[in-house]
Image (cartoon, helix red, strand yellow):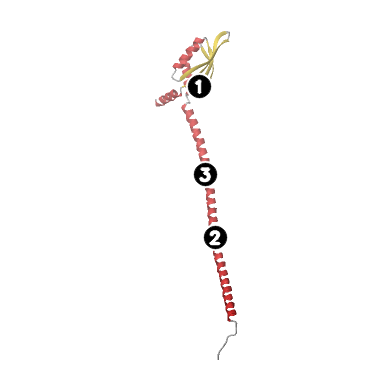
């Protein structure tokens, strides 16, 4: 017997292709979802790892900032100690300067000259005093010029004054201290 298929075979093939297409679309959709989930997981893991690295770096930076602050504080302390040390060394170097200055003034002071005040500012010394005459002031300046510890005497002012009923010359004189000579003299004294 001969069989004749009266069913619309084209319709059936279309239906099968449609089912295959929908099945393929479903599988592709599932594969796409799986791929999207995997990509999301990988990117999320990378972001999480990077955030943990950033957190670690921030903690280490905070530690280093603390150490830098401590170093700055220590440097400031070192600077303060060094400045104190320099002050002490300068005081130690010139501790006998006043004695040497007074000793030198006693040697160089001519008769008839009297000091009213002595003021030291840095390496300059200002003398204010009275002399019996201007010639005595000139002699004092020559003596100071020849002194090994004093140099460059400069007469600021001289004027006539009356002290105890006597006419005298009041003078104002500035002299520089030769600190090199003072330091050499201290070194020679310490060597003895």
Report x, y in % for residue 82: 49, 35
Tell me where residue 33 appears, x and y as whole percent. 57, 67
Q: How far apart are marks 1 and 3 (CA)?
A: 44 Å
Seen in the picture, residue 43 relative to 120 is either above or below; the reply is below
Disc 1 target residue: 124
Q: Distance between the residues labelled 1 and 2?
A: 78 Å
Badge 2 crowding class, 10 Å Cα cut-off, few under 14, some 14 to 19, many 20 or more, is few
Kind of element beneath mark 3: helix
First along the sequence among labels 1 and 2: 2
Which callout, 1 or 3, points at the residue further toward the start of the chain? 3
How many discs appear?
3
Residue under numbered circle 3: 68
In the structure shown, which secondary structural element does the residue marked by tag 2 occupy?
helix
Report the quarter where the N terminus lies.
Answer: bottom right
Q: Dots 3 and 2: beta carbons under 8 Å?
A: no
Task: Residue 174: give its label.
Answer: none
Residue 107, visible in the rendered structure: no
Check if mark 1's residue and mark 3's residue have beta carbons within 8 Å: no
What residue is shown with label 2? Answer: 43
Badge 1 element:
strand
- Name above or below for residue 11 compared with residue 67: below
Determine the residue located farthest toward the left in the rendered image: 192
């Amino acid at each position: 017997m001969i069989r004749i298929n009266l069913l619309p075979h084209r319709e059936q093939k279309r239906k099968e292709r449609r089912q295959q297409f929908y099945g393929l679309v479903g599988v592709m959709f599932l594969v796409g979802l799986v791929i999207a989930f995997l990509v999301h997981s990988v990117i999320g893991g990378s972001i999480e790892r990077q955030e943990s690295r950033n957190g670690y770096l921030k903690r280490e930076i905070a530690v280093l900032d603390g150490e830098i602050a401590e170093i700055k504080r220590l440097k400031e302390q070192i600077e303060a100690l060094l400045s104190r040390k320099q002050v002490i060394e300068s005081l130690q170097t010139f501790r006998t300067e006043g004695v040497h200055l007074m000793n030198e003034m006693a040697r160089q002071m001519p008769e008839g000259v009297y000091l009213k005040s002595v003021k030291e500012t840095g390496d300059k010394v200002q003398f204010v005093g009275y002399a019996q005459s201007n010639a005595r002031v000139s002699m004092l300046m020559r003596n100071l010029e020849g002194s090994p510890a004093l140099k460059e005497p400069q007469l600021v002012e001289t004027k006539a004054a009356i002290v105890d009923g006597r006419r005298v010359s009041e003078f104002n004189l500035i002299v520089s201290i030769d600190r090199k000579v003072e330091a050499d003299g201290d070194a020679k004294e310490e060597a003895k």
